[in-house]
Image (cartoon, coloured by chain):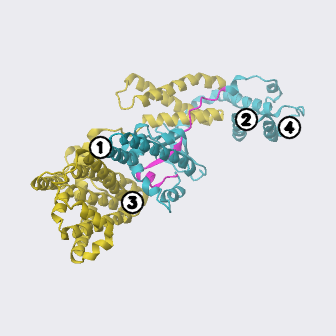
Chain colours: A cyan, B yellow
Amino acid sequence: MSHVVDLDIAVDTTLLVITPEHVRFDFQLAGPFHRLAAYFLDVICIAAIGFAVAIIAGFLGSSGIGVMLFVWFVLFWGYGGLFETLWNGQTPGKRAFGLRVVSLGGLTINAQQAVLRNILRGVDVFPPFFPGLVAMLCSREFQRLGDMAAGTMVIIEGRLRGPDVTWGRKSRDDLDALIPPNFRPDHQLIDVLGSYVGRRLDFSPLRRQDLSGLLAKHFIRAWSLPRDTDTDRLLCAMYRRAVISQQEQDEETEATDNQWRFLNP
Amino acid sequence: MKLALLIEQRASDWKALEDDLDWVVTQRGKRLDPQRLSEFARRYRAVCSDLAQATARRYPPGTIRYLHQLVAAAHAQLYRGETFRFRDWGQTLFVAVPRRILRDPCTWIAMGLFWGLFLGAMARAWLDPEFAAQVVGPGVLANMEEMYAEPLSERAPDDHSRDAMAGFYVFNNAGIGLRCFASGLLLGVGSLCVMAFNAIMLGAIFGHMLLSDKSANFSEFVTAHGPFELTAVVLSTAAGLRLGWSMIDTHGLSRGAAFRQTAPRALEIALAATVLFVLAAMIEGYISPSALPYWFKAGVAVISTLLLLGYIFVLGWRSPGERELAGLEVEGADHET
């Protein structure tokens, strides 16, 4: 089965998992603040459901009170466990904030884990020490005590966004011709270019010019391009050239490349 | 081949995998069409290889992020844990749990402490009439005396208020049981505190009520549900102690690993205790306050005691069958190294 790799170099909130197919993928872990928001929403849900049950029970007289107390018991102790079992690791609060509970290896949780971590929740939010918060800060996977017992963690799932193919569509630009044919960027430069191209639409046009200028000005000087070259478009053209032309060149080494990929996950 | 073209070509397969994921999630628990399932597995492997390639060849970050999510989601579905199966739960409740209860010293420690404190407080209340009032408060005692002032046969409540009482006993008592288990997280001390508090309160009330002239009414009320309820308290405490003790005596594992290994097993005992609490609440709500003759209530108590003894000793004593040896874990954490 897949296992989690605890890399010393990992300083951010991602967790690397290696699948049986020898592919690594990472999880974005949810910290205390994400989870607190989801928890508050769940508390509101529990209160709302409990209140609704109480109103309905009010019409049924003292039999209704018995049913209400029974439902309350199931609601207070079973709300998280039931939802996380039926909704595959999500409660309404977690779903609203895009969180999900998974096992440490990245697999879906089972009913036992869901029930266990939720029954132990009472201790995690025990004031004034909040042992769960302390445990989260000490744990690399932000586990509260209930998570440690059940072997689970909470991840930020986000919504699946489609593959980003837009950058390739507009695949011709007169700037392409200005880049020297012997331009062979190293991996570091391709990464920088890639991050820029991937995120440039998050910035306003002016900010884009600002950021791209920092890198592009060196190439404008080195390749003696006109001073008023659009730095944003230049970086896009460089990335296109880097990735696409490198692709063509790599075709020849495809066979050996494949082997390497699977033996060194 | 151009990268953009490559991505666009593969995108249809990625979309198909997304659809497969929706399908697998919505069909959860049902029999899946094997044809489509093998398609799903094939697509997953293909996307894994796409992700590896995307990382090695510096695909656009958006695409890589997308592939990470897609692989994670598919991986979680393909290698998911076992789903909910009632048969396994029966197996756990009637095979694994009684064996564990019988062999776990925590059970007998919890039982000894509970009965020691309970009988001690009772004896003290018997000898010193002031004691109960100091422990419980005079208001509660006056309430209790008023409750049992009349014989049960004369003030038999109507059916509706019995429903309310049964619901209350589930909510309150089973809630206390689960809280008692959960507070075992604090190295077992929490469970002991909750248990000791309840044992001394109960003992003091029992001692006081048995001294009073209403003792016949009181003992008639508590007889029927006593065995289930008191055993449930003991088992909740035992489960909490087991949870806490796993962090102290780790049997060579790391503290975290020992804790993780023990917690699900302790939970099963706590859930068995919850079942007992619910049974006790039903008896306490419908049989104990009823006008049924005393021999019937005493009979209920005897039968439930025999059931409990049978559960723990007969089911617990059985040697492991082949099925259990084949993989179902029945041993407590303390039997493993």
Residue, x 46% and y 56% (percent of image)? Answer: A124
Question: Which residue is under mark 2?
Answer: A200
Whole-angstrom CA distance, mark 3 to mark 1, is 32 Å
Type of amino acid under label 3? Ser
* Quadrant in the picture for the C terminus of chain B: bottom left
Tell me which segment is drawn in magenta.
A142-165
Going by the picture, which residue comes out furthest to the bottom? B128
Image position, residue A81 (x, y; %): 40, 44
First in residue order: circle 1 vs circle 2: 1
Image position, residue A164 (x, y; %): 64, 29
Question: Which residue is under mark 1?
Answer: A63
Classed neighbour count for the residue bearing mark 1: other residues with Cα under 10 Å, few (<14), some (14–19), many (≥20): many
Type of amino acid under label 1? Ser
Question: Which residue is under mark 4?
Answer: A222
Dot 1 lies on which element?
A: helix
Host chain of mark 3: B
- Closer to the camera, B323 or A69? A69
Q: From the viewer's perspective, is the residue at label 1 or at label 2 nearer? A: 1
First in residue order: circle 1 vs circle 4: 1
